Amino acid sequence: MKRRRQEPVVKKEPGKLTVIIYDIPPSLNDWQGMHWAARAKIKKQWESLLIVLLRGCKRVEKPVVRITYYPGIERSRDKDNYTPKFIMDGLKKSGVILDDNVKVVDLDWSIGPVVECGRTEIEIWEG
């Protein structure tokens, strides 16, 4: 029997916002080879999900964003293939961050250990 994916979680702590999504966006290698319409559809899904999840959250003026991908299967991964383009565009469109350029946001991402159900954790706080 296939496991049902868990619902996303938003944790609001004083000075920190954490979003947990039980999925991982496609890698750069995956989305570069996609048809433009398929890529646009996936990008829109991630953006829309973040807009809904972060509705009502205050804007972080000088955001520090840390993203950790926890893959669901073991295999070799290159950090640079997991550039968080879809996530950052979603954070911008949600209004939580003003812009995703380097003058505004301190961004880094990493690949964590393999877990039973792959997930993406996004942490945002004021820098």
Image (cartoon, rainbow, N blue to C red):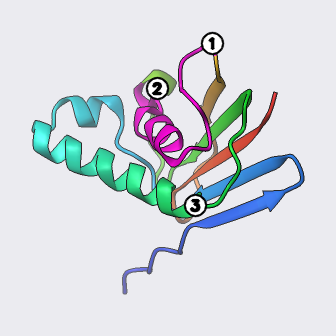
Please tell me in which quadrant of the rendered image residue 98 appears: top right
Identify the residue position indicated by label 3 in the image. Answer: 55
- Specify the label residue 124 is tagged with: none
In the image, what residue type sits under mark 1? Lys
- Specify the label residue 103 is tagged with: 1
Magenta segment includes 26: no
Give SS at disc 2. loop
> At 44% from the left edge and 80% from the top edge, which residue is drawn?
4
Q: Earlier in the sequence, mark 2 or mark 1?
A: 2
Give SS at disc 1. loop
In the picture, the quarter occupied by the N terminus is: bottom left
Dots 2, 1 in contact, CB < 8 A: no
Q: Is residue 76 above or below residue 13?
A: above
In the image, what residue type sits under mark 2? Asp
Q: Earlier in the sequence, mark 2 or mark 3?
A: 3
> At 74% from the left edge and 51% from the top edge, which residue is drawn?
17
Query: What stretch of residues is rendered in magenta?
Result: 81-103
Please tell me in which quadrant of the rendered image residue 108 appears: top right
Q: Is 2 placed left or right of 67 in the picture?
A: left
- Specify the label residue 78 is tagged with: 2
Q: CA distance from mark 3 to mark 1?
A: 24 Å
Q: Where residue 122 appears, x then y in whole percent?
A: 63, 46
